[in-house]
Amino acid sequence: MQLGCSLPVGDIGTGPLVLRDYAQAAEGLGFTHLMAPDHVLGVNPAADHEGRRVGTTATAYHDPFVLFGFLSGCTYNIGFAVGVLILAQRQAVLVAKQAASLDVLSGGRFRLGIGVGWNEVEFIGLNKNFHNRGRRSAEQVRIMQALWAAPHVRFEGEFHHVEDAGINPRPASGRVPIWYGGHAEATLSTLCTLWRRLYAACLSAGRGGIGGFREIAGVGPRGRARPGGDRDRGLGLPRFRRPRGLAARGPVLERGRGHPPHRAHDLRQQPPQAHRRP
């Protein structure tokens, strides 16, 4: 079994030193990945919200791409996963670009966890439609996968249009692994259809959780196929695999450029920003 851990920003703070130390400690203890959530906007916690569930500014959230870009320069092997990115409130092509860049700079250690979101105030502030977020998110996944896989793509969807264009750099593998987060039946059905990974930390054992997931997938308690299941092979939850790009404990950022690799090592030993000139 491989285990990851969450970044407890609410407990340890948001500063670069403490985040670096936490990530390095988690890596030293053998955790395989770090997970961080995503929220862009929060409402005023002192206001009267009439009993509604809202996200407030009382909790801090780093932008996950910036956070993991920083931590990838402070660690060697540990992976990074967003738990989860609210994809539908962002531009899909921009997310594809950000994820590809992070994949390249981290040596393939990034996993993109996505969800449809629940906090309408964020969608309003980001000028995105809250009510069609499920449909848009499904199409966003398709266009991102197309952009990661090929130098140039033609894509004509309901919400996205790309005419013979692409992103550069792209992931060396031609893909960024996607994890789905959520507990609604639509999320579980999507997972069964696309066969990606499930972020199941918040799922219950009932119909809306793992039990519902097995029922939709047509598998038994051990992931074995039941008659009439979606696929004869059954459904298992694959492990978080240790990335190959940075598997060896050593600096790699300058590899292949004819320069000694001391800079990568120094970034991991010195305080954040110590490499910058005054």
Image (cartoon, rainbow, N blue to C red):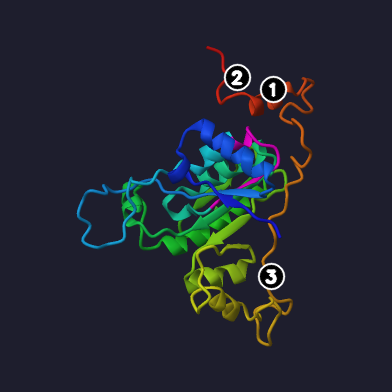
Residue 183 to residue 272: above or below: below
Crowd band around label 3 with a 10 angstrom C-alpha radius: few (<14), some (14–19), many (20+): few
Q: Would residue 69 be seen by someone viewing this image from the given angle?
A: no
Residue under the point 66% across and 43% down: 27
- Of label 2 and label 3, which has the lower sequence position? 3
Distance from Cα at disc 2 to Cα at disc 3: 44 Å
Q: Specify the amino acid type for callout 1.
A: Arg
Q: Specify the amino acid type for callout 2.
A: His
The disc placed on residue 275 is 2
Residue labelled with disc 3: 236
Range drawn in magenta: 71-82
Q: Specify the amino acid type for callout 3.
A: Gly
- Measured from the top left, where is residue 18 in percent x and y? 52, 35
Q: Would residue 244 be seen by someone viewing this image from the given angle?
A: yes
Q: For residue 103: magenta?
A: no
Residues marked 2 and 1 touching at CB (< 8 Å): yes
Residue 35 to residue 63: above or below: below
The disc placed on residue 143 is none
Residue under the point 60% across and 19% down: 275
- The kind of secondary structure element at disc 1 is helix
- Of label 3 and label 1, which has the lower sequence position? 3
Quadrant of res 211:
bottom right
Q: Quadrant of the N terminus?
A: bottom right
- Measured from the top left, where is residue 125 in percent x and y? 32, 47
- Of label 2 and label 1, which has the lower sequence position? 1
Residue labelled with disc 1: 263
Question: Outermost residue, top direction?
Answer: 278
Residues marked 3 and 1 touching at CB (< 8 Å): no
